[in-house]
Image (tube, grey):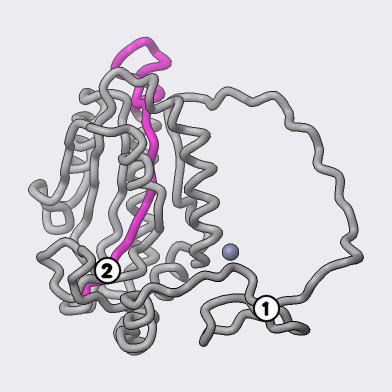
Amino acid sequence: MCTVCLGNRKAEIINKYLPVVSSWSEPHFLTLTVKSIPKKNLQAVIKNMKQAFRKILNTYNKRNLRGKGEKLVGLMSIECNFNPITKTYNPHLHIITNNRKTGEILLAEWLKRGKKKNVNAKAQLLVKVKNNKDCLIEIVKYGSKILTENDLNKKASSGKKVTIYLKALYTIIEAFEGIRLFEHFGFKLMKKPNKEAILAKIAVDFREFNYDSTKTDWVDIRNKETLTGFISDQRIQHILENCIDTESS
Ligand SMILES: [Zn+2]
């Protein structure tokens, strides 16, 4: 949930996987969806989706080991957004494949295995990746959007009205419990040589700061000096003060 931790996670994954994606011949971006669902089904559906995906990989892996068929190679992340109008959730898988063939196989298997009423062929998307880094960022940034556009048909841009659906966000995070949000398949990561161990030191001379939301900064408890000098964006301030919905889910 913490945006700082999410930022660190994002940087770590990008450093690890960008060289891999960049070595692929023709990376493709695939989105696999299911029909939107109410809150009570969310965790079960997420588990089913991951299981279904795993099954496809296992089947092809076994075949490949017998010397038949494609090796499926790629990265996968799971994301879920909230639709405030219908009060439903739409978990979906974001996948980057090594080439178009892998993407086509995954898509075809997903449609074949999904029940017709739950999986709509038109809602799935397979496109060629234009920028490896942007695409990687796209799939690892959040498990869910923090800001939801009020008009779902339009893309969020700085001028658009947005709401933070706090309860719905919590529902999503709760449903993700114990679920691996990011995975790679079909390849092994090269191990980096061990880094030098960082020796711990005990700090004896330090300053103490408290966060003051009115100053949007940390403040020294003794001399009241602010730590970062950060000045909050007006739009963010407006959203935090006026656009948080704690009821809908
Ligand atoms: Zn954190």
Q: Is residue 139 above or below residue 6?
A: above
Q: Does 193 lie within the magenta span?
A: no
Asked if the residue under mark 2 is in contact with the one under mark 1, i.e. CB atoms within 8 Å, the reply is no
User: Residue 218 in the image: x percent, y percent?
Assistant: 63, 76
Q: Residue at x 62, y 80 (%)?
A: 211
- Tell me residue 57's x, y (percent): 37, 33
Q: Residue 124: where, in percent of width, then height?
A: 16, 46
Q: Residue at x 63, y 76 (%)?
A: 226
Q: Quadrant of residue 128?
A: top left
Q: Quadrant of ligand 1?
A: bottom right
- The residue that mark 1 highlights is 225
Which image quadrant: the C terminus? bottom left
- As drawn, 82 above or below 71: below
What's the residue at 33%, 45% (across, down)?
Answer: 52
The reply to whether the magenta stretch includes residue 78 is: yes
Q: Mark 2: which amino acid?
A: Tyr
The magenta span reads: 60-83
Q: Which residue is mark 2?
A: 89
Q: Amino acid at mark 1?
A: Glu
